[in-house]
Each structure stands twice: as structure tokens, then as C-alpha cells.
Image: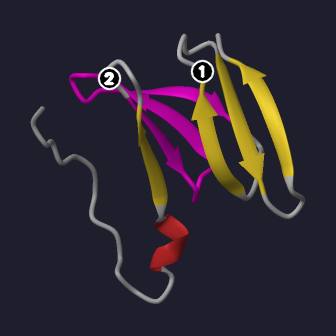
């Protein structure tokens, strides 16, 4: 596996925590990417190409988990604390 850097550089000012995101490895050499600033979920494949899997109106995403067959995603939010399940197309 080789490391690939893509994207734009972020401002390292006092509000840098707003641009923080989560990258979760999946079992089949793909990655689940959660952008906490825009509340969007992406899958990054083996070649590094991103695909938007869920454009949500959910705020305060805390944790995300995807099913092994990539058909369901579970999202835990905070304030209000809840777990929501979504079926992916």
C-alpha cells in the first residue's frame, strides 16, 4: 500500500478543528471518509478516487460505521445523542 496525498491545504488558524475529518479503513482496502465540516460521507477506493455515498443533513456526526457488505451505514450523533441507520444505494 502506498501513501497518496491529495486535496488542498487547510488554514492552520484558531478554527482548524472545524475542518477535522475521520478516515476509517474498511476490510477491502477502501476507506470511509467523514468530513465533519460539511457532514458528508465518502468512500475512497483502492486507486484513491472518492465517491460520495451519503449527503446528509445530519449535524454533529460523532462516529460512523459501515456494514461489511457496504449496504448499511450507522451514524452516531451528539447533541442530541442518537444512532441512525441508513441503507446505501
Q: Nearer the viewer, mark 2 or mark 1?
A: 1
Q: Is residue 23 above or below residue 88?
A: below
Q: Position of residue 55 (x, y in %)?
A: 65, 34
**Quadrant of the image for the C terminus?**
top right
Q: Is residue 57 above or below residue 66?
A: below
Q: Is residue 49 above or below residue 80?
A: above
Disc marking residue 45: 2
Q: Nearer the viewer, residue 17 or 11?
A: 17
* Residue highlighted by disc 1: 67
Q: Nearer the viewer, residue 81 or 11?
A: 81
Q: Is residue 78 left or right of residue 89?
A: right
The crowding category of the residue bearing disc 1, from other C-alpha atoms within 10 Å (few below 14, some 14 to 19, many at least 20), is few
Q: Which quadrant of the view contains residue 8? A: bottom left
- Tell me which numbered mark, 2 or 1, is placed earlier along the sequence: 2
SS under mark 1: loop
**Residue at horizontal 86%, vertical 56%?**
81
Marks 2/1: CA distance?
16 Å
Q: Which residues are magenta?
A: 31-55
**Residue at horizontal 76%, vertical 54%?**
59
Q: Nearer the viewer, residue 19 or 69?
A: 69
Q: Is residue 36 above or below residue 14?
A: above
Q: Is residue 6 left or right of residue 77?
A: left
**Quadrant of the image for the N terminus?**
top left
Amino acid at each position: 500500500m502506498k501513501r497518496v496525498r491529495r486535496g488542498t491545504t487547510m488554514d492552520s488558524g484558531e478554527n482548524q478543528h472545524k475542518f477535522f475529518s475521520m478516515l476509517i479503513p474498511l476490510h477491502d482496502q477502501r476507506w470511509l471518509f467523514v468530513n465533519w465540516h460539511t457532514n458528508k460521507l465518502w468512500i475512497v477506493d483502492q486507486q484513491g478516487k472518492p465517491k460520495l455515498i451519503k449527503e446528509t443533513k445530519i449535524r454533529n456526526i460523532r462516529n460512523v460505521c459501515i456494514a461489511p457488505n457496504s449496504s448499511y451505514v450507522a451514524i452516531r450523533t451528539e447533541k442530541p445523542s442518537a444512532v441512525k441507520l441508513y441503507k446505501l444505494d
